[in-house]
Image (tube, rainbow, N blue to C red):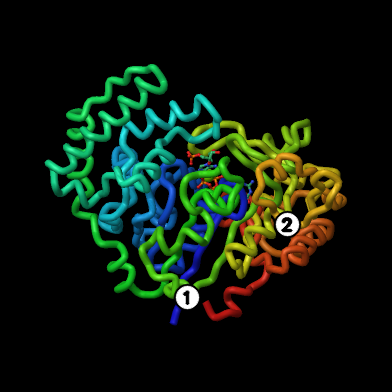
Amino acid sequence: MKKDLVVLGAQWGDEGKGKVVDLLSKDFSAVVRYQGGSNAGHTVVVKGQKFVLHLLPTGMLHEHTRGIVAQGMVLDLELLVKEIEELEARGLKVMERLYISDRAHLVLPYHKVLDSLFERKGKIGTTLRGIGPSYMFKYGRKGIRVCDLEDRDRTYRLIKENIEFVKDLCEKIYCENHSLSAEEIFEKLLENYQKIKDRVVDATRFLLGFERNVLFEGAQGTLLDVDMGTYPYVTSSNASALGLSNGTGLPPKYFSNAHFWAVSKAYTTRVGEGPFPTELENELGELLRQKGGEYGATTGRPRRCGWLDLVALKHAVDINGLDGLILTKLDVLDHFEEVKVCVAYEVEGKVIDHFPASLSWLEKAKPVYKTFKGWTKSTKGARSIEELPQEAIEYLEFIQEYLKVPIVMLSTGPEREEYFWFERVYAKAGG
Ligand code: GDP
Ligand code: IMO
Ligand code: MG
């Protein structure tokens, strides 16, 4: 039996999941996105052509893969239709390979209004895509699901009720008036729904009946997980492996034979607010940003940059039950005389080696570093371990030993071909 594969983000998102999922997808029949929404920006570069996917599974860039948009996602139908049309205009047939869950919730314009308002106080630095409010409505039982759109009266009534609620909130709490029109939102929604309605399925049943050769593509990253991340500076879904079952509607047992891999940069970045113990707010951080092109794929915001944090990464290894790690952007470290990794935190004089739940602790955590001599040679585009300088190999071996998990793949550039298998663990396991 072939094995399914789960690919997650191990850090605060933007680890290079898009690049990795794209190249791995060629061996899979279907790729599933199951949490988050258009807050994600997954970049793939193929022969100099750049694609950034927000809602569609990245694996859909291969003509043979089916793409499943599962129930745990929150969907902005306008953006989904735009993304499909843009890919089709670039010559890819997408629509006929796409399956959209009837249980997925919608993101509507009033969610975006609330996202902006909530950001005024206690800023999280969200992507302003309406993600948090859409999940709030879902769990507050005010959400509208894709399956509701077949019942026009019900959909219109729900939109109207929700708009009244949002307007009240805006006026009474934020003293603002918003000209949200139920008619306009309803018309636009139905117009977009007409374009995708033939692709709507019960995605759980579809996957249960489908061959076991599926890749599950996580969005965001473990440290942005609403339960296991740096709460409240997180996204509103379970971006770690915890989100798989509720995000897909598949029983936990379904995943018992799957491989669990996560992607990490060879250093760390984060967008938005929140604790980041190894952040470099100096010229080294700026060098990482410039050499790594660290600007958000969704919002264009400059990403905060710092050294690799092994305490945080070990947390990701443990809670995701990782079988392997995929390391990206090693080439960005080519420019450094010295490379550091955080091996513990010091909090109020105490050394701790686990990732704490408490925000107060995380905010106070001072990194304890191990320093490596830089290799200052190009690893860009390296295709085998023999092409790596000895200093780079030592850096990678230390990471594996600390985490007690193998690095299975190394990415050495943004292009599809710029990678190699560091250890052929997956092949050995018979996948
Ligand atoms: P994702 O959200 O995890 O899919 O990551 P993003 O696409 O938001 O950001 C990753 C960025 O790094 C993109 O611009 C990729 O093209 C780029 N990238 C991925 N892997 C590598 C690599 O190994 N080296 C370099 N230099 N860039 C990479
Ligand atoms: P991919 O899939 C990096 C961050 C936002 C903010 C927090 C909450 O490309 O890795 P939200 O809009 O989700 O309510 O914002 O989460 N964030 C991401 N950061 N990559 C992402 O996705 C992200 N999606 C959300 O910057 O700090
Ligand atoms: Mg991204």
Camera-side residue of 275 and 209 = 275
Residue type at the position of mark 2: His
Residue 98 quadrant: bottom left
Q: Which mark identifies residue 3?
A: 1
Q: Residue at x 49, y 75 (%)?
A: 256
Q: Is mark 1 within 8 Å of ligand 1?
A: no
Using residue 287 as the reference point, say whether residue 368 is left or right of it. right
- Outermost residue, front side: 172
- How far apart in space, not on screen, are marks 2 and 1 (Cα)? 31 Å
> Which one is closest to the eye, mark 2 or mark 1?
2
Q: Position of residue 64 (x, y in %)?
A: 36, 63
Q: Earlier in the sequence, mark 2 or mark 1?
A: 1
- With respect to residue 203, does 12 lie above or below? above
SS assignment at label 2: loop
Asked if residue 89 shows in the view, the reply is no
Q: Residue at x 45, y 33 (%)?
A: 128
Residue 417 quadrant: bottom right
Camera-side residue of 196 and 385 = 196
Asked if residue 67 shows in the view, the reply is yes
- With respect to residue 399, does 55 lie above or below? above
* Residue at mark 2: 354
Q: Position of residue 52 (x, y in %)?
A: 46, 43
Q: Position of residue 47 (x, y in %)?
A: 51, 49
Residue type at the position of mark 1: Lys
- With respect to residue 21, does 255 lie above or below? below
Q: Residue at x 43, y 52 (%)?
A: 35
Q: Is mark 2 within 8 Å of ligand 2?
A: no
